[in-house]
Image: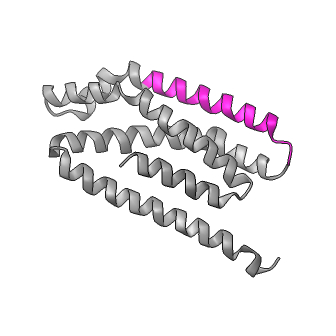
Amino acid sequence: MKFSAHIDKAFWTALDKVLTVAFGFVFMKVSLLYLPVEEWGIFSILYNAIFLLLVNLGSSFALQPLMKFAAETEDTDKIVSVALILNAAFMAVAIAVVLIARDWLALWFASNASEAASIQSAIAAFPLLAAAFFFRNFLIYILQAKYHVIRILIIDGIYFGENN
């Protein structure tokens, strides 16, 4: 295995990670500029504490095994199908649990009644947020399994550009 054979993939992967970090900084700066402090805090709690936890659990449960098994074979149809079903089922159940528990979550995270109402309405948007993440994450894991790093960069560029 020659190191020089992997330089191009390392370059595109590093560029993708730089894009991700830059998006994070820009996203935080823009959200801090336009959201009132209280709403930004509510968004941060819900997004970082709940939503990213669910996405990462779903990735661990279905997408990381997809990447491992898809990298080992050329016939990925069954692997992709099973991973899609597992990830969709996990995310559907997880989002349903969060929606059912939104009153309790609002009481847990809120310090007053107006914050609780804001938290409840923000949680109601979780299915849309999950749908936006779901397809991107699923496709990224498939592309990672096959080392299509330029395609990952393009998808991240479109995804991050659309969200700004």
| Residue 83 in the figure: left or right of residue 159 | right
Position in image of residue 143 (x %, y %): 68, 51
Position in image of residue 116 (x %, y %): 21, 27
Q: Quadrant of residue 24?
A: bottom left
Position in image of residue 124 (x %, y %): 34, 24
Residue 85 lies within the magenta run: yes
Rendered position, 12 above or below 81: below
Position in image of residue 115 (x %, y %): 18, 31
| Residue 46 in the figure: left or right of residue 6 | left
Q: Which residues are magenta?
A: 74-97
Q: Quadrant of residue 43?
A: top left
Q: Residue at x 67, y 32 (%)?
A: 84
Give the farthest residue toward the top.
Answer: 100
Which SS does the magenta portion mostly show? helix
Quadrant where the N terminus sits is: bottom right
Residue 10 lies within the magenta run: no
